[in-house]
Image (cartoon, coloured by chain):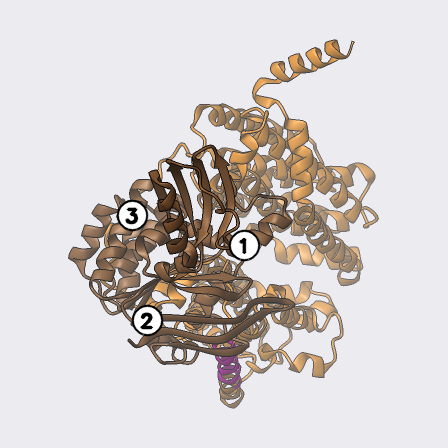
Amino acid sequence: MATATAASSTAREQTLGTLAGTGRLLRFQARRTRVYLTGWFVGLVGMSWLVAASFPELYPSPEDRAEFALTVDTPAMRSMTGPGEYLDAYAASTGAMFAHQMILWTGAIAAVMFILLITRLTRSDEETSRLEVIRSLPVGRRSDLAAALMLAAFAAVALGLLMALAVSGMQGVDAEGALLYGLGFTAIGIVFASVTAVAAQLASYGSSANGLAFGTLGFTVLMGAIGSAQESWPLWLSPVGWAQLTYVFTPEQRWWPLAVAAVVGALLVWLAFALVAKRDFGLGMLPGRPGPSIAAPGLNSIGTLTFRLTRGLLWAGVITMLVLGAAYGSVVGSADDMLSGLSDTQRQLIDQGGGSMAENFSATIAKIDAFFATIFGLLVIGRARKEETGGRGELLASAPVPRSGWPGSYLPAALLVSATATVVGGIGLGLAAAGSVGDWSYFGKLLLASVIQIPAVWVMVALAFACFGWLPRAGWLRWLPWVYTFVVGYYGDLLEVPGRARDVSPFEHAGAYPAQDVEWLSIAVLLVVGAAIAALGLAGVRRRNLHFA
Amino acid sequence: MTSVIHTEKLVKRFGHVTALDGLDLEVAEGQTHGFLGPNGAGKSTAIRVLLGMLRADGGAARLFGADPWSDAAELHRRLAYVPGDVALWPGLSGGETIDVLGRLRGGIDKRKRDELLERFDLDPRKKGRSYSKGNRQKVALVAAFAADVPLLLLDEPTSGLDPLMAAVFNECVREVAAEGKTVLLSSHVMSEVEALCEKVSIIRKGVVVESGTLTEMRHFTRSQIHATLKNPVRGLGDHEGVHDLKADGLDVRFQVDAGALDDVLTQLAVSGVAALTCEPPSLEELFLRYYGDELASRGLDNGNGD
């Protein structure tokens, strides 16, 4: 009897063939990613829930929402939100307004979650030798991919249900609508998981697989933005657009656009499974390119090496900030119209004490530009830590380079990257604002408004460097000040944060040009404070042990 | 002879763990010095203190007579280092990495670099992320051997190399030594240390338990003797310098203390010797002597008894 059972289970394993062991791998991968998944769930659902809770207060009456709908009904605003079909339903349903404002951004962020999930479970495992160990076990050659995709599918369904819960209870939201809203995110998750599954077969490295998938995301979001702005077909090229095209919570609500996602997802999964069995283990379908055998003459110092190693982040910053700047800047022209559509709370948010609404709004978006540009500086500091924990710094720490050179050169690199990102963001803001207002003086205004934020950005970067110098293990500590200043700066009025708690943030002292005059003295003070913190950070870097892997 | 590396009662702690517990290490100029010990004995920690990456908690360390912590960058002009686990930049090719490291040292001898690439059979155009462990190590080795510096610190440099490449490595170390350069070679490959090093320090739990030339160290340990005698010998077992005596008719095997060798051989000669082999202790046996108790506590034979 026992033999017969054993024999039949062996037979079952054999019929499963290339998928053998998928169930066990699924459990293993679920365990490995539970913290990752929980973190993303909490972040995405929490963010949606917070916004859902704040909307009734911001736009209490149908009239408020109808007026707001008018201000959103410009090509520029639609490109940053979604198709115009939602706008007519703003008055009748807070849910429709919420869906219109939220699906694009939350959907894009959810896509990032699934891209990173699939890459880390497939190509990154293959790039290191982790997957090699697993493949040497009695498991099929498609089983790890199958387990990763199943895990992503489960996570997508869970995310959809949680999102449905987060929006239920809002005005104008029924159970069917809430479920449709949630399943829109399930669809986005599954599509981008399958896109990444294919990318992981094409690319040879985790970083290039991520690059391919993020490129796809960026391209489709751009197509969606164009589609929404022009109210035309390119929106159908975007997986996030499919969720928007359900017109959820409006009278035109429909399910079938999600079927497009199902079909595309199935095709991509089929392609990934075909490719994974076709290619050699460890290699991608796209061959890796060799590098130069001799270093370029310029690559001759620790500074140029650090610059070379952080070049990718610089480009990421330039492109992101240009797009972000153009998006925000294009709204300045309609700022005066928006004034009437805003509730008192929102007006308070934007009021910087300036003459016109456009100037107030310019000051606000220049500050937002600086917040986002800071991120790229902090990412460069994070690289310094990775060079250390990854062991690569050991070759440099043993070279005739003082600590101020390595890892110290990451400070000037971070200052350079963050300042460049701020300026480029300002250029994007200025060009788009000047275009939308029809007044070229706005180019100069927004550029200067952004440039004067740089000292505050540098204080934040120096602070992260000081954390790296003194408490290198606490990576979260490098981000804490940024989160604090962002919350205080962005939601300070809404949350009624007391003045003294706000004054800690350097951005509070960078002034509010063009709404107010430039305060050169406080900018100079910021520079001095930044320099002092940077010096403190360098002292920390000099005195501590370097820990390599 | 001036000493290039000198540590005295060097202490380094990580939290509750004491990695170096009063380490005394002395490496003279021009010497190829073997630094022996199993994983976790403190070899890498000692080297990283000497490189100024870690700050010592006690004792003194001197590199070329200077403080390795405060004068790190200046001292690094005079040395090249190969880490035990070489990590490379994923986006830089091997050639670029070698050039950058060379240029940080003030320039690289292109002819020597290319010659070493040839000898180590390394493709410099591959990107860092696509090299195997052995090839990553070769990148660091080429960078180190191409540098014109008086001191090489090599931390288990051959752990990923195949035997052919290990032979190339040995050749390179000999050439460097012939030029009068100092080499500290940390390793647990006994044959490598035995072949290359004039002097050896054995480290255990953060302390140097034995240091000297191989000849000196052998002097304190036993040789293995295998003799076929013409007549039976008596009283050999009673000699206090003789250990583990096994007699099978006229065939005797035993270990003998270096000090008693003279005496015992005379006694054997009296009986008449048909055949005799005398093996000096291998470095491995010397090494195991210091770690024998550790092996015994894990229920393993210390390798001396057949």
Magenta stretch: dominant secondary structure = helix
Which residue in the structure is indicated by mark 1?
B291
The location of residue A117, given as percent across then percent down, is 59, 43
Chain whose colour in the figure is brown: B
What is the crowding at mark 3: few (fewer than 14 residues within 10 Å), some, or many (at least 20)? some
Q: Nearer the viewer, residue A439 or B226?
A: B226
Q: CA distance from mark 2 to mark 1?
A: 26 Å
Q: Nearer the viewer, residue B169 or A23?
A: B169
Chain whose colour in the figure is orange: A
The location of residue B262, given as percent across then percent down, is 37, 55
**Does A533 appear in magenta?**
yes
Q: Give the vertical position of A160 relative to A488 (above or below).
A: above
Relative to residue B137, is residue A480 drawn left or right?
A: right
Which residue in the structure is indicated by mark 3?
A291
Mark 2 and mark 1 lie on one chain; the one further toward the N terminus is 2
**Disc 2, SS:** strand
Of tags 2 and 1, the one toward the viewer is 1
